[in-house]
Image: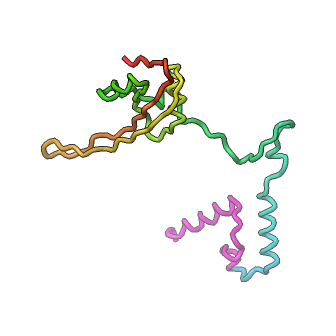
Amino acid sequence: MAIFDFLKRKDENEKARGTNRPLGHTKQAKKAGKVSAKKQSAKVSEVKKTKSPSVTEGAQPEGKVIANPMATKKTTKGFSYEIVKAPHISEKATGLAESNHYVFKVVAGSNKTEIKKAVEGIYGVNVLSVNIIKIKAKKRRIGKTQGFKKGHTKAVVKVAEGQKIEIL
């Protein structure tokens, strides 16, 4: 019947992948009767032997030793210009600029070290500290229409004494 064709395809896919399902679950084993325990354990051990990676596959060039070959190097989210969107210009932000604090709109999800590297890369200054502020979305209503004002993330960056960032 065409209704049960998906079961046949599922079994074929599992055979192609070489899954180590017990032999008692296949259609052929059910038809033939029970399979002995020795044959079943031998089949499972063969699958385990073929699945284990050989030493030559993951071998490193001589002289280089990696402690954990499965560990991956963490990459930053993007370039400096992708993390820092724009300077946030407001009355409070211009007041903070007198005390070497500058406010920027940044990408949500970026951390303090990424923001620090981005500001140092763009403006060529030494950043002492970074504080992150998350502004939530706010409800807005115009007549019958209801909606939300977008939320965003700001970063307040403290720059070393004697250094300035020219925003305007």
In the image, residue 162 lies in the stretch drawn in magenta:
no
**Is residue 8 positioned above or below 109 on the image?**
below
Percent coordinates x, y for residue 121 in the rendering: 54, 23
Percent coordinates x, y for residue 159 in the rendering: 48, 25
Point out the stretch of residues depicted in magenta. 1-30
**Is residue 47 positioned above or below 109 on the image?**
below
The residue lying at 79 percent from left, 53 percent from top is: 53
The image quarter containing residue 165 is: top left
Q: For this view, does 130 lie left or right of residue 55?
A: left
The residue lying at 57 percent from left, 35 percent from top is: 76
Q: Main secondary structure of the magenta part?
A: helix
The image quarter containing residue 33 is: bottom right
**Is residue 158 positioned above or below 62 on the image?**
above
The image quadrant where one finds the C terminus is top left
Q: Nearer the viewer, residue 52 or 8?
A: 52
Q: Nearer the viewer, residue 17 or 107?
A: 107
Q: How many numbered tags mark residues here?
A: 0
Q: For this view, does 30 lie left or right of residue 105?
A: right
Percent coordinates x, y for residue 102 in the rendering: 41, 27
- In the picture as drawn, the residue positioned furthest to the left comes out as 143
**Is residue 138 positioned above or below 87 on the image?**
below
Percent coordinates x, y for residue 47 in the rendering: 77, 63
